[in-house]
Amino acid sequence: MGMTMTEKILAAHAGLSEVRPGQIINAKVDLVLANELSAIVAIEEFGKIRGADKVFDPGKIVIVPDHFTPNKDIQSAKVAKAVREFARKHETLYYEVGRMGIEHVLLPEQGLVRPGMLVIGGDSHTCTYGGVGAFATGVGSTDVAVAWALGEVWLKVPPTIRIEFRGKKQPWVSGKDMILYAIGKLGVDGGIYSALEFTGEAISELTVAERLTMANMAIEAGAKNGIFAVDAKTEEYVKNATDKPYTVYASDPDAQYAQTIVFDMAEIEPQVAFPHLPSNTKPISQVGEVEIDQVVIGSCTNGRIEDLRVAASLLKGKKIHPKVRCIVIPGTQKVYMQAMKEGLLETFVEADCVVSTPTCGPCVGGHMGIMAENERCVSTTNRNFIGRMGHVTSEIYLASPAVAAATALAGKVMDPGEIK
């Protein structure tokens, strides 16, 4: 009996010839990620491990301060300082403000995550890296601490749900719309502790950036990981980022899937997730009149250069609605620099947007765009829970960069195809 991509990667890292769903394994990790919020707890737990006076491999530990940085207050500065000191003491990979970015944009960009790797991170959106054919999943800070010490993680092998997107994309439909549509059909618990393997004709059309976006939001369906087959686009992306080796795993033709779900691209138009769940989706044609106070374009979901190009293409030569504030957050310093070279930042500023340094900021309710009572925001982020971005009566509508930019111009949720 064959295995899926996810099963093959886990078997290889557990030193086994095969694994099956439900099996408990100890697996060697290739990379352990933490941001300042998960790292500060992991540091405390690491200190409790008897005999753990050093990390297992400094070159396989990455710490990226990105949630409340640049530090927004004294408490966040204290946390960042403690994490910085730990990283320096143990000589881990550490990306300081000015050299960093939003972790899940930064790591693929730097070639730190590659096909066939097993990556764990103290952040639920670590599943992003399935976009380049890695097994990647979020874990708690205690698991991070143990992995720092031992280089291993305890896992249960997930069953795999195969999601096939048939046909060609419609105009203005992106990977973000496809994953929102899928989550809308699956629900926030439809993929509980499963691997979501994305396939189909439409997937081959997608850029690697769009695949990273889709893998990023696998967790919003409750999934353990999201993963894409490695193709020529993947390999070109990885080789442009690094010359380090990697291993390609592919699902066997006779691999056993828990379920196969087929979506017809002819039925998928730009999507908007209404408050207060990522699964509360509507096609743009059914949104109606929803006035907006704020737009956020960025985050680990949609802060890549490709996303900024889409937004800028709609905003160029125009002004955002006078009642809207639009916040643009490049995912990394490299993305920021590229956007500068291409004139995208000039386009945003001329359109009356504000451009921020790379940060998770408003997505996690940290800073750079917190909302007051009853305000509404269209955001390219990944979650729209109650109070996620500010006051508990505020509302978040999730959408693609195209819908977000169109909305900033119109002052209400808008179909990008309607912008002239």
Image (tube, rainbow, N blue to C red):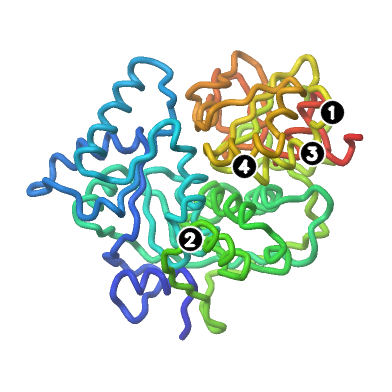
| Residue found at the very far left of the displayed protein | 51
Pair 2/3: label in front: 3
Q: Secondary structure at mark 4?
A: helix
10 Å neighbourhood of mark 1: few (<14), some, or many (≥20)?
Answer: few
Three-letter code for the amino acid on which mark 1 is drawn: Gly
Q: Secondary structure at mark 3?
A: helix
**Looking at the image, which residue is at 41% across and 43% down?**
123
**Looking at the image, which residue is at 49% across and 62% down?**
195
Pair 1/4: label in front: 1
> What is the number of the mark on residue 194?
2
> What is the number of the mark on residue 317?
1
Counting residues from the N terminus, which is met first, the one under dot 4 or under dot 2? 2
Give how far across and how far down residue 219 sits, in percent. Answer: 51, 49
Three-letter code for the amino acid on which mark 2 is drawn: Ser
Left/right of residue 80 with respect to residue 360 in the rendered view: left
- Give the spatial CA distance, label 4 vs label 2: 24 Å
| Residue found at the very far right of the displayed protein | 420
**Looking at the image, which residue is at 71% across and 34% down?**
344
- Using the image, determine if residue 392 lies above or below residue 145: above
> What is the number of the mark on residue 302?
4
> What is the number of the mark on residue 313?
3
Give how far across and how far down residue 30 sits, in percent. Answer: 34, 60
Q: Quadrant of residue 164?
A: bottom right
